[in-house]
Image (cartoon, rainbow, N blue to C red):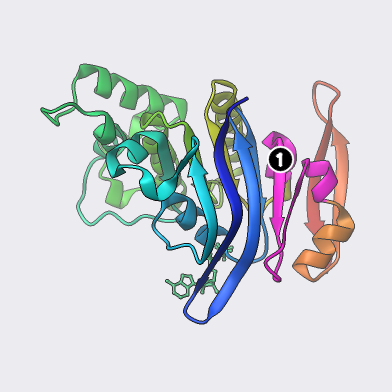
Amino acid sequence: MAVVLDLDRVCCGYRDTDLFTDVSLRVAESEVLCLLGPNGVGKSTLLRAVLGSLQLRAGRVRIAGRDVGEWRRRALARTVAHVPQAAAAPFPFTVAEVVLMGRTPHLGVARSPGRADREIAARCLERLGIGHLAHRPYTVTSGGERQLVLVARALAQQPRLLLLDEPASDLDLGNQAMLLRTVRDLAAGGPAVVMISHAPEHAFAVADTAALLDRDGVLRTGTPAEVLTESELTRVYGGPVRVLTGTGPDGSTVRGCVPLL
Ligand SMILES: Nc1ncnc2c1ncn2[C@@H]1O[C@H](COP(=O)(O)OP(=O)(O)OP(=O)(O)O)[C@@H](O)[C@H]1O
């Protein structure tokens, strides 16, 4: 599988502080990488570096083989979609209009969406189970609904690389499962996915690779079972964590994590 995202010895920080100095990772087509780590270690910052919106202090970020700084903005927007942690809408666009904005990088010289763009946007709304919200102003949607709208907008972009920053943090259990299935099915069709999450069970459920960033800026990567062990989670999060196992409907092992008090 072709490598879509390649971080080589990346160093990022703000003002006089480096958050991490030597982060390397690769994500290939159809791969789901789940990025975990304590609050404030720099997970969202890493995504900013991938998007080219934060100057690297050292290292290289390549997307589809080309340095992120060498990409034209429009071409980058056709290739990479980003779902931020939260996005306020200054104007009361409808949900359908917000999702249609995902088509913007693909529009031709006329710059106005056509029937095919509207159909893609409508399919993305249905895929996330929010077709009934299409005509509601985005500004009056709930926190969880808003997350689903932003994911639908990113899917409408039809990216080769999808960056999700805690996309399930406001979702109920049913919608978490729906979102994780959507991520898994999407990746099976080709795109690479990087998903930040505070729930190790999300990594166990859908990730090929788990990447755990600690407070010293060290990133450990491997399969979820290799990286997300009780001892490693306890070390990184600074308190005891249990990994519990059960059996899924198909007989496979399912894992969840609980912090101990
Ligand atoms: N523009 C900025 N200027 C200065 N410091 C910043 C800036 N943006 C973020 N930070 C700081 O950098 C650190 C890392 O922030 P970041 O948002 O990347 O963390 P995170 O790992 O995504 O955290 P969380 O899990 O809480 O979302 C934090 O201490 C944050 O306060």
Q: Is residue 191 left or right of residue 72?
A: right
Residue 66: x and y in percent read 45, 40
Residue 145: x and y in percent read 42, 44
Q: Is residue 215 above or below residue 115?
A: below
Along the line of sight, the residue nearer the viewer: 220 or 88 = 220
Residue drawn at x 32%, y 57% is 88
Q: Residue furthest left?
A: 110
Along the line of sight, the residue nearer the viewer: 221 or 87 = 221
Residue 32: x and y in percent read 63, 36
Residue 212: x and y in percent read 71, 55
User: Does residue 36 show up magenta in the picture?
Assistant: no
Q: Is residue 35 above or below residue 155?
A: below
Residue drawn at x 68%, y 51% is 199
User: Does residue 202 show up magenta in the picture?
Assistant: yes
Task: Determine which quarter of the picture holds residue 27.
Answer: top right
Residue range (magenta): 201-228
Residue drawn at x 18%, y 21% is 114
- Whether residue 170 is visible to the viewer of this picture, yes or no, is no
Q: Is residue 188 above or below residue 54?
A: above
Return the residue at label 1.
209
Which image quadrant: the C terminus?
A: bottom right
Residue drawn at x 27%, y 54% is 89
Q: Which amino acid, mark 1? A: Thr
Q: Residues within 10 Å of mark 1 (few under 14, many from 20)?
A: many
Q: Is residue 170 left or right of residue 86?
A: right
Along the line of sight, the residue nearer the viewer: 66 or 184 = 66
Name the secondary structure under disc 1: strand
